[in-house]
Image (tube, coloured by chain):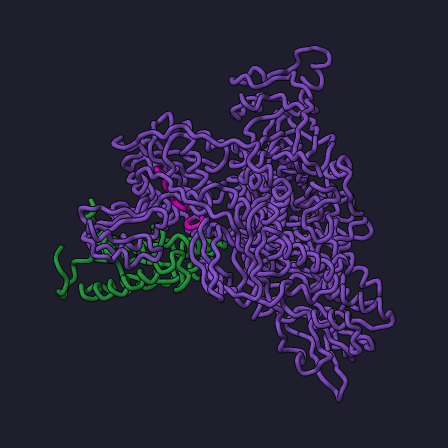
């Protein structure tokens, strides 16, 4: 089931007021709590993210980012605790290393780097969370809809 | 004190304080008898719409506690009951309670409401503050526990007219009730209960605004009290949360709040500050703007804006600067009805400069103060407790919770006005104190909860039930809930989907259990609020229904949807559908997970040897736990060593000496004084702390009580002239009779030095009172001294108002300055000159000062950052520790097993520090009293056939839980050590390692359905 594939529809581009759809992987202890705080403080941000709660940003397998993109997400946000604050001591460093790798991989396959973002948001940073979402949304919106991970024109990428 | 102690505690009053005390005690091995005067538990909190400073929905944060309290095996609830007699002494009281008949059998009543439908008698609804009606058979509010109706014998036709004459009058309810729960012949019962200790939290009542005629309350329809306004705002209120005037249903566009109605008023013997009204008025103004469909103009008429609590000042600034709430410093003359027939009110008031103005408003809200209720007074009398001149219970000085009788503790507004966090803190402190008193009897009267056998679900067809919550109007007003329900029904595995007004309420839990049975559900999804707060509640319901707690997932469509997309209902609805879909996918792939039990180390570590740390240590030691107290300074005492007298005149030196003596000689306390912490590792039940001398301490919990520091002013020539000193320095100078102070004639106190400014946006809370106390001390020593206090708002909350009043009467001059026009201190030759612009005279005045006392801010502790990293606990922007929940978990961290107390949490006075220290000890005691640490068991596991024993997992695991078995060439996870972060699972090259509850398959499948 892990490697099972399914047909996906690439996001429709005819939507006039284009609003991207972004997969947000939030760690339970800092960023998810920060997102909750943004809620109780009523800091408004665009309705673009779809949250997937994970125990730690270190839980995120680079594959998930590709999976998200392959399934129609226009962008991905990964957010964890600030360096040194990880609830599990060093999970966010694990995440950071993986993230550096995935960035270069995306570049290699010809996908815009700005589609994936990484941020640190603590449980006390409601404002920051809403700002992060605004920023990510703007960057992804500027790139337009994601036309699929493996369908870049100038080659370099691999077939599925 | 009695030798035959009883391991049970009676708690009188079941508001939030009573509920918190009850849960703490019941969870730490004591039987609790919870006695409540009305027909349901909850108190005042369910009446409130939102709570400051987080704007959390009051019902939403309270509801899980109501449910938990209601279904706790070791909490016995007696509604409609009052204490009428107590005998015995601390450790062994015989209490008699009188229970009025409810006329409805709680065990039979299903809360369906058929009886109320047919009841012909309509009466004013007290819960809605008389706005709106209820029937003579009623339930206070829909989420009430017990979820059962009650008959009001003063209003019921049969009870008032038929019963005495033996005639069958009305009795419609009897016919309507299918459950046969109604019994008109119930009688008054007297119940005798033996307990070891008592905790009293009868709460308060609000001031009767009609007694001050000039506010027009009761005569003018558009004048309401603040509690009535809460009901207008509330989704469960008489207008379903639509902000309208009760008498003509018009949407108000201009609303005014009048502060200090029944507070700070010596003429009616209410010369105390109720402490909470400034914040609730600001909150109501902000929420009114949020609730209304049309723009609302809000104005608050006040004398001093008192927002001294944690994060309150920011809330005030935000209301003023960003939300457009208008604040007018004024004195109110009267409120009259507008003559244009609109029903509006006209406020006549004088500005600060003495100018008289009038202004018309659609609605005027009176910020009514808090006072002791009749039942509080009666309770104090029955138990023969000392009360103060306002009728509030008088607590023993510097105890935080002790009443004048040993073994009887108090929490909440019984001993004076206080807000919810302070009430909850005191409630936990009282529970800790009771637990310390009865520690030998812990566990003697309690029983353990048993769950039905877990249903086997492996291999069954997946049948998911979906519950979408309206959360009053919190979700429902933005997200189209019925649409989400319909959508959910179309998704794979879903066999039923339904909506709930409050999914977390008692009745919703009951219905959830029934639906699990009816539809044979084996997966549950709830779309409501944050799993961080509500997941445990729903999981408990699953367990009670015989399902494994992990066959469950939540979608957060409130905190992360409706609240953050308030102006985009369509997009929010789309998002809610997506989030619900993702949760359904995740839940459908959840497998049962069995909890892991680990050994509990029953020792505690207290960091910081000041008053907070020592109080916590002592309380924990008295509760029977071994305590390690670490203090980095060469001796115990902390900042309190520099204080002479407390705010109620206590001798701090003597108090401190006694405290140090008790801590030093307590057999269960080990002191590590002059030692610093070098490293901390571990988690609840199993921490290891290394000191700088290499000693390793093992402990199960930790209390962080490292205090704060005094701000070193850069302003007002501080440090350049010895006549400019901080409050602590001045206090010390007064104690040593320093010539500098003894011979001085002109004293100037400058408030808010380093507080309420850009650098430190918070209020340091204690400095106004401290300055008033110091000024009075100066004046007492030298009545001819000229004393000036330059202030921005005098924040002498609670009883400190009396000191402020006394100071004014003694001729101390209070001059207000504004933030943008701060006083200037200059030197003309050897003379210190303070220049300040007086608001009444509207021109600068110059004061020649012999001594200038600066109210220097209380700043966050220096070592906060280090401890934050070691214990994995967060700090707020100002460097104070951030609690798990501002309102209801004021001493807990979100990390289990770590607690906080004292100034490290936020600035507060010593009495409050002591109360919080006891609360932290109480909460820590709850954790330590468990035999074992139960962890959810969401750990990593290895598929041996895929594993190549490469060792990557071992390398990334920071908990040292994974190791490679070199013999069998396979990675092995130690369940007891695994914290479930999943770094190994995401790093494994062969996909051999996975995480329970968050598997690769689940996430990939969620993304497939993205």
Q: Nearer the viewer, residue B32 or A99?
A: B32
Give how far across and how far down residue B150 sits, in percent: 61, 25
Give how far across and how far down residue B193 sits, in percent: 66, 28
Query: Residue at left 64%, top 27%?
Result: B122
* Tint of chain A: green
Q: Which chain is purple?
A: B
Give the residues in magenta: B551-561
Farthest-out residue, right? B784
Tell whether position B553 is magenta: yes
Q: Nearer the viewer, residue B601 or B865?
A: B601
Q: Is residue B695 visible?
A: yes
> What is the quadrant of residue B279 in the picture?
bottom right
Q: Quadrant of the N terminus of chain B?
A: top right
Q: Is residue B47 visible?
A: no
Q: Against B145, is A126 above or below?
A: below
Give how far across and how far down residue B388 sits, in percent: 78, 47
Q: Nearer the viewer, residue B507 or A83?
A: A83
> What is the quadrant of residue A81 in the picture?
bottom left
């Amino acid at each position: 089931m892990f490697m099972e594939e399914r047909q996906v529809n690439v996001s429709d581009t005819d939507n006039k007021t284009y609003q991207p759809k972004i997969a947000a992987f939030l760690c339970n202890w800092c960023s998810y709590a920060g997102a909750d705080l943004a809620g109780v403080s009523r800091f408004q941000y665009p309705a673009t993210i779809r949250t997937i709660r994970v125990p730690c940003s270190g839980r995120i397998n680079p594959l998930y980012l590709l999976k998200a993109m392959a399934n129609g997400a226009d962008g991905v946000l990964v957010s964890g605790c600030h360096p040194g604050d990880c609830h599990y001591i060093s999970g966010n460093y694990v995440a950071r290393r993986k993230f550096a790798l995935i960035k270069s991989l995306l570049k290699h396959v010809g996908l815009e780097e700005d589609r994936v973002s990484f941020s640190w948001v603590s449980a006390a940073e409601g404002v920051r969370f809403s700002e992060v979402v605004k920023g990510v949304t703007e960057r992804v919106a500027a790139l337009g809809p994601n036309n699929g991970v493996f369908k870049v024109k100038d080659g370099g990428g691999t077939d599925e | 004190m009695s030798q035959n102690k009883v391991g049970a505690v009676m708690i009188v009053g079941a508001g939030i304080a009573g509920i918190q005390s009850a849960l703490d005690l019941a969870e730490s091995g004591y039987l609790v008898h919870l006695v409540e005067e009305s027909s349901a538990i909850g108190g005042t909190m369910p009446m409130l719409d939102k709570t400051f400073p987080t704007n959390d929905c009051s019902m939403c944060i309270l509801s899980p506690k109501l449910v938990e309290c209601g279904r706790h095996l070791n909490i016995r609830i007696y509604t409609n009951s009052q204490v009428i007699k107590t005998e015995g002494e601390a450790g062994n009281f015989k209490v008699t309670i009188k229970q009025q008949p409810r006329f409805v059998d709680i065990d039979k009543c299903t809360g369906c409401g058929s009886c109320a439908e047919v009841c012909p008698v309509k009466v004013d609804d007290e819960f809605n503050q008389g706005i709106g009606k209820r029937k003579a058979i009623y339930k206070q509010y829909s989420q009430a526990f017990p979820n059962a109706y009650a008959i009001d014998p003063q209003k019921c036709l049969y009870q008032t007219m038929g019963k005495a004459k033996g005639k069958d009058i009305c009795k419609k309810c009897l016919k309507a009730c299918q459950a046969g729960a109604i019994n008109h012949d119930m009688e008054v019962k007297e119940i005798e209960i033996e307990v070891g200790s008592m905790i009293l939290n009868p709460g308060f009542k609000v001031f009767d605004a009609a007694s001050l005629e000039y506010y027009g309350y009761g005569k003018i329809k558009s004048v309401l009290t603040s509690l009535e306004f809460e009901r207008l705002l509330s989704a469960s209120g008489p207008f379903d949360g639509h902000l309208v005037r009760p008498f003509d249903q018009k949407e108000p566009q201009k609303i005014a709040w009048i502060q200090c109605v029944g507070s700070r008023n010596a003429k009616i013997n209410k010369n105390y500050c109720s402490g909470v009204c400034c914040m609730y008025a600001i909150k109501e103004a902000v929420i009114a703007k949020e609730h209304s469909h049309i723009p609302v103009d809000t104005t608050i008429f006040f004398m001093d804006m008192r927002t001294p609590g944690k994060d309150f000042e920011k809330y005030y600034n935000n209301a003023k600067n960003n939300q457009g709430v208008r604040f007018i410093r004024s004195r109110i003359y009267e409120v009259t009805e507008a003559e244009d027939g609109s029903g509006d009110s006209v406020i006549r008031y004088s500005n600060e400069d003495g100018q008289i103005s009038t202004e018309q408003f659609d609605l005027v809200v009176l910020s009514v103060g808090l006072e002791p209720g009749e039942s509080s007074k009666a309770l104090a009398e029955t138990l023969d407790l000392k009360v103060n001149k306002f009728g509030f219970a008088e607590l023993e000085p510097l105890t935080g919770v002790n009443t004048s009788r040993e073994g009887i503790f108090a929490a909440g507004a019984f001993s004076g006005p206080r807000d919810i966090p302070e009430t909850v803190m005191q409630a936990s402190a009282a529970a800790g104190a009771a637990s310390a008193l009865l520690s030998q009897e812990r566990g003697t009267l309690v029983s353990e909860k048993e769950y039905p056998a877990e249903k086997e679900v492996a291999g069954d067809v997946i049948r998911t039930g979906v519950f979408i919550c309206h959360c009053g109007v919190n979700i429902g007003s933005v997200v189209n809930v019925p649409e989400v329900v319909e959508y959910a029904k179309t998704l794979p595995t879903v066999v039923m989907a339904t909506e709930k007004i409050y999914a977390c309420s008692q009745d919703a839990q009951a219905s959830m259990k029934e639906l699990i049975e009816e539809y044979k559900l084996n997966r549950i999804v709830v779309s409501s609020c944050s799993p961080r707060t509500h997941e445990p509640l729903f999981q408990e319901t699953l367990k009670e229904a015989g399902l494994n707690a992990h066959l469950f997932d939540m979608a957060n469509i409130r905190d992360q949807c409706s609240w953050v997309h308030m102006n985009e209902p369509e997009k929010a609805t789309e998002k809610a559908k997506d989030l619900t879909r993702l949760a359904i996918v995740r839940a459908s792939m959840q497998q049962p997970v069995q909890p892991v039990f680990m050994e509990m180390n029953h020792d505690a570590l207290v960091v910081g040897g000041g008053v907070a740390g020592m109080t916590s240590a002592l309380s924990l030691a008295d509760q029977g736990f071994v305590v390690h107290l670490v203090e980095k300074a060469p001796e115990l005492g902390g900042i309190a060593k520099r204080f002479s007298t407390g705010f109620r005149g206590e001798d701090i030196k003597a108090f401190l000496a006694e405290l140090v003596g008790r801590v030093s000689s307590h057999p269960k306390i080990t002191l590590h004084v002059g030692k610093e912490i070098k490293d901390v590792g571990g988690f609840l039940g199993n921490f290891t702390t290394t000191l700088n001398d290499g000693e390793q301490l093992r402990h199960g919990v930790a209390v962080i009580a490292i205090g704060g520091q005094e701000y070193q002013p850069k302003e007002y020539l501080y440090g350049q002239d010895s006549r400019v000193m901080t409050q602590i320095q001045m206090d010390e100078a007064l104690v040593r009779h320093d010539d500098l102070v003894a011979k001085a004639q002109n004293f100037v106190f400058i408030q808010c030095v380093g507080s309420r400014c850009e650098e430190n946006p918070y209020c340091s809370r204690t400095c106004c009172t401290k300055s008033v106390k110091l000024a009075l001390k100066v004046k007492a020593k030298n009545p001819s001294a000229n004393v000036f206090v330059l202030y921005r708002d005098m924040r002498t909350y609670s009883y400190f108002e009396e000191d402020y009043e006394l100071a004014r009467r003694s001729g101390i001059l209070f001059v207000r300055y504004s933030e943008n026009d701060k006083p200037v201190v200059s030197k003309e030759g050897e003379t210190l000159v303070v220049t300040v612009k007086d608001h009444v005279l509207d021109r600068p005045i110059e004061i020649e000062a012999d001594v200038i006392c600066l109210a220097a801010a209380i700043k966050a502790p220096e070592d906060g950052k280090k401890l934050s990293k070691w214990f994995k606990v967060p700090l707020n922007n100002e460097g104070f520790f951030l609690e798990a929940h501002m309102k209801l978990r004021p001493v807990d961290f979100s990390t289990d097993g770590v607690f906080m107390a004292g100034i490290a949490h936020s600035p507060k006075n010593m009495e409050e520090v002591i109360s919080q220290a006891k609360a932290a000890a109480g909460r820590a005691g709850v954790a330590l009293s468990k035999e074992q640490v139960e962890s959810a068991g969401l750990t990593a596991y290895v598929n041996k056939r895929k594993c190549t024993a490469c060792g990557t997992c071992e390398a990334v695991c920071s908990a040292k839980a994974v190791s490679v078995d070199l013999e069998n060439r396979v990675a092995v996870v130690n369940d007891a050590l695994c914290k479930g972060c999943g770094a190994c699972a995401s790093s494994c090259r062969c996909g051999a390692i996975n995480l329970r509850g968050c598997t690769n398959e689940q996430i990939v499948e969620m993304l497939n359905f993205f």
